[in-house]
Structure formats: structure tokens, C-alpha cells
Amino acid sequence: MTKQVLILPGDGIGPEITAEAVKVLEALKASDNLDIEMTEDLVGGAAYDVHGVPLADETMDKAQASDAVLLGAVGGYKWESLDISVRPEKGLLRLRKEMNLFANLRPAVLFPQLASASTLKPEVVAGLDILIVRELTGGIYFGQPRGIRTLENGERQGYNTYVYSESEVKRIAHVAFQAAMKRNKKLTSVDKANVLEVTEMWREVVDEIAPQYPEVEVKHMYVDNAAMQLVLNPKQFDVMVTGNMFGDILSDEASMLTGSIGMLASASLDENNKGMYEPSHGSAPDIAGQNIANPLATILSAAMMLRYSLGREDLAVKIENAISKVLDQGLRTGDIYSDGMTKVSCSEMGDAVVAAL
Ligand code: NAD
């Protein structure tokens, strides 16, 4: 059956980079029986300019009816002074919330050709390939009660609640185990079980689920050690699973091991592997409209969409191999350029990936 894909280019470089991902998907439709129908709509500032809101109800309905959403980026100088309720980011948050996207998958992949872009030694990071699975809709960012109160002695006290129910841990653990099954079958669950009861339970639930995936080797690691190990020996990791706050921090740390923001994809999934796919970077208003942005993070996000929501692992691998080939050819957008390479524009990079397919 034809799968429905909603394309939301958004703002800034969003339209330029998503156009290149669409180009790649169109090529696969023609060459590899990729059975998808793509529809485009507005999100972020672009939606605000037309509808007065960063995500129209009709667009939300289309997203709900789609098998996957591919998003560029939102935001820009033009909309910074708007009331917070209609800022471009609110469009993104609404999509995440109403689509119930509880699982955030952020790969930190360093193509060996770009090893010199990292601040770490090339031998430490060359070939790095980590997938961080972060719980996105629970934990301390959402726990109640929360707030700032004044105590009887007049002193102010800030407080938050770190809470996870068993079912929340189970569903994110299943996503992580299933992702590990598609990769090198190693899973590291990150917690602070020596101090926090909520993560003591997290650890127990992960262990209870593990027998359902006998091929996956499971390890538990305290978050402080995980932060250290990511810098010391990042290639020991395959899939890491953790809660919302630890995942927020560790995924940023891991992504920066690669040193190139224009290369990092992400996926946010619901219980049925329906998802939203977007590059990890923002709308880069400083370079928008110049055809110089790196479209590879968005093209890699499209590859994740094929892998997780559209059941075409074969085509995900095909895209990843094509990107590797293009890098082997020495083609680089400005953000990943180094001496001796050939500098290409955003659209030339997209064309090169299509040619390499
Ligand atoms: P940014 O990621 O947009 O840009 C940071 C720097 O990286 C800039 O110098 C930019 O030119 C560069 N960069 C980013 N993506 C690139 C690419 N594909 N190719 C080449 N260079 C690239 O972050 P920012 O400057 O902090 O934010 C700009 C706007 O994006 C803000 O309005 C912010 O709110 C928004 N934002 C949106 C998202 C999202 O849509 N998910 C995420 C982060 C920031």
C-alpha cells in the first residue's frame, strides 16, 4: 500500500535542505519501487505568516494521517519577537505532543572521511556510530509537582519531580532493544541507580525485558561514567537508552564528537513506529537562501524514515552508502570543507547523492 509522507520544510534553510531530501526520495521512487506519496505543507514561521499560528489544524490532521513526517527546521529572526504561544517552535512541540512521539533517536555517526572535523583525535572517533534512544515525553521535564515556592522562613525553593511509570520505561526499552537488533546488538542503559530510585526501577524494568531479546548484550552504566566514556572511548557504544534529561545531555555530547552539525539526523517515534524525522540542527537563518547549507543531515533523516517508519532498510542503507561515496569523491559543503576537497552547493550535494545512488 502506498505510504503517505508529509513534508514540512519550515523556515530558513528548511526549504533548501528538504528539497534535496525529496530529490533523493523521488529518485528512489523511480529506481527502487519506493511506494510513497509526498505532500507538502507549512510549519513554523512560514505557517504563522499564512495562518497566524505555527501549525494549522489541517496540517496537524495531515500529520496524524501520514505514515511519517519529514521536517526541515523552524525559526528565524523575523519571528523572535512574537508571543511565545505562536513562536515557530510551538509548531514542533505540538507535532511531538499530539503524535505522541515518545522515542527520540539521535544517531552520532562520523563518516571516516570527516574524522578531522572532530575536536577529538581521529583514531578515537573515526568510524563512530552510536544511536542514542532518549525518552522524550516523560521524566523530570514533565513530572508533577513542579515549581518555585516560598518557604515559611521566606526563602524560595525550586522543585521538580523525577518520575517514570513502568509502562513508560517498558515502551522506550522495547524501542531501544529493537533498534539494537537492527544494528550491532549491544545496548547500554544509562541511569543513576545508585542515587535515584526512579532509575533503580528503570534498571529493573530493562533487565525484565532483556530475555525477550536474547541476542542483545545489555550493559548498565551510571550517567556520570557514560559522559566520561563517551569522550574516552566512544566506539565502545552501539545503542544507548536513557531518560529524557540524561538523553538530552548525552545526545548533545555524542553529536559533538562528530564535529559537524550539518551531518546529524534524528527521528521521533510513536508506539507504532510512526514518526517525525528532522536534522538535529536549526534553521540557520545566517545562511538561508544562499544554496550553501549542508543537506546531508536531512537526507540522512530521510534514510532513518525509510528504516523505521517505511520498512525499507535496504533503501536506508543505499542512501547511507551513496553519501559515503560522495564524501569519498571529496565533495563537501562549506561547513565540512577542508583543504584539497571540492566545495559544492546544497543542490549540487543533493544531485551528487542522487548520482551515487
Ligand atoms: P542552527 O543549528 O540553526 O545554526 C547554528 C550554526 O550552524 C549556524 O552558524 C548555522 O549556519 C550552522 N548550520 C546549521 N545547520 C547547518 C547546515 N545544514 N549546513 C551548514 N551550516 C549549518 O542554530 P541557531 O543558530 O542556534 O538557531 C537558528 C534558528 O533555528 C533559531 O530560530 C532557533 O530557534 C532555530 N532552531 C530550530 C530547531 C529545529 O527546528 N528543530 C533546532 C534548533 C534551533
Image (spheres, grey):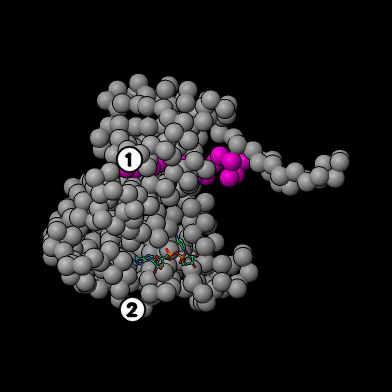
When asked about the image quadrant of residue 342, the answer is bottom left
Give residue 290's mark.
2
Q: Quadrant of the C terminus?
A: bottom left
Magenta span: 129-143
Q: Is 104 on the left or on the right of 297, as rendered?
A: right
* Most foreground residue, 345 or 177: 345
Q: Regarding mark 2 in the picture, which secondary structure is present there?
A: loop
Q: Is 78 on the left or on the right of 9, as rendered?
A: right
Q: Residue at x 73, y 47 (%)?
A: 148
The amino acid pointed to by label 1 is Pro
User: Which residue bears the numbered disc 1?
Assistant: 234
Q: Are marks 2 and 1 in contact (CB under 8 Å)?
A: no
Q: Is 263 on the left or on the right of 59, as rendered?
A: left
Q: Percent from the top left, x then y, of residue 321?
A: 17, 53
Q: Percent from the top left, x then y, of residue 45?
A: 50, 72
The amino acid pointed to by label 2 is Gln
Pointer 2 or 1: first along the chain: 1
Q: Is residue 157 above or below residue 326?
A: above
Q: Is residue 138 magenta?
A: yes
Q: Give neighbour class at mark 2: few <14, some 14-19, many 20+ (Cα, 10 Å).
A: few
Q: Is residue 145 above or below residue 65?
A: above
